[in-house]
Image: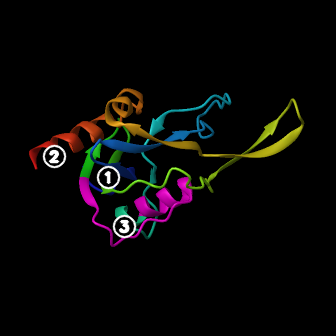
Amino acid sequence: MNEENKTTCGILLYDLNPLRVFLVRESGVYQTRYTGEPGNWGIPKGGLKKGKTPFETALCEFKEETGISLDSDSPFEDLGLHPYNKYKSIHAWALRWLPPAKSRFVCSTGRKRFNPKTQETQFIGEVMDWKIFPYEEALAIINYRQAFLLTQFMSVKEAH
């Protein structure tokens, strides 16, 4: 699969001893029929941005969805480009680092939605929360299309 296909780019944060991973929970605001119910857990990710490399896009999406800036010179591991679904691929990177538990969460991307009950328009962030999960719990809760990222990542870590 090449980068010209519809590509989404993301970052998997983790730590070892014990193995834990950072996931975000989508708000569901970009679903065709927004129900107000929380969406899937997954890595912060987004579509390849025009004029940016996949890695630059991944860093930008991480910042937009969490409010956390990552240093591009950090020792990222390229997890490669993989089929994601019928229409797009995913290119992901991993970094051994977790934000402090008290880190402030800020999602700067989303949509305005009209609430007919309150007659008000409100901004709903693309991501509603983040959490650090033990590996097994993350594997059970992550969007099924992203589960391979965790299993592939684990196999690489176990090989070293």
**Gap in angstroms between the C-alphas marked 3 and 2:** 24 Å
| Residue 56 relative to residue 156: left or right | right
Graded by Cα atoms within 10 Å as few (under 14), some (14 to 19) or many (20 or more), the crowding at tag 3 reads few
Quadrant of the image occupied by residue 97: bottom left
Q: Is residue 118 above or below residue 126?
A: above
Query: Helix, strand or loop at disc 1?
Result: strand
Instruction: Give the amino acid type for the residue marked by disc 2 in the picture.
Output: Val
**What segment carries the magenta color?**
57-79
Crowding near pointer 1: few (<14 within 10 Å), some, many (20+)? Answer: many
Q: Position of residue 125 (x, y in %)?
A: 64, 47
Q: Is residue 142 magenta?
A: no
Q: CA distance from mark 3 to mark 1?
A: 11 Å
* Mark carried by residue 156: 2
Residue visible at 60% across and 46% down? Answer: 126
Q: Which amino acid lies under the numbered mark 3 shown in the image of this protein?
A: Thr
The residue that disc 1 covers is 91
Given the current orientation, which residue lies at the most extreme front position?
A: 17
The residue positioned 27% from the left and 65% from the top of the image is 75
Q: Please, what is the three-letter code of the amino acid marked with disc 1?
A: His
Vertically, is 105 above or below 145? below
Label pair 1/2, CB-CB below 8 angstroms: no
Which residue reaches farthest right? 119
Q: Residue 129 sits in which quadrant?
A: top right
Q: Secondary structure at mark 2?
A: helix
Mark 1 and mark 2: Cα distance apart in space = 16 Å
Name which of mark 3 and mark 1 comes first in the sequence: 3
From the image, tell me which residue sits under label 3. Answer: 53
Q: Is residue 136 above or below residue 108?
A: above
Residue 63 falls left or right of residue 89: right
Instruction: Mark 1 vs mark 2: give the one in front.
Output: 2
Among numbered discs 3 and 2, the one appearing first in the sequence: 3
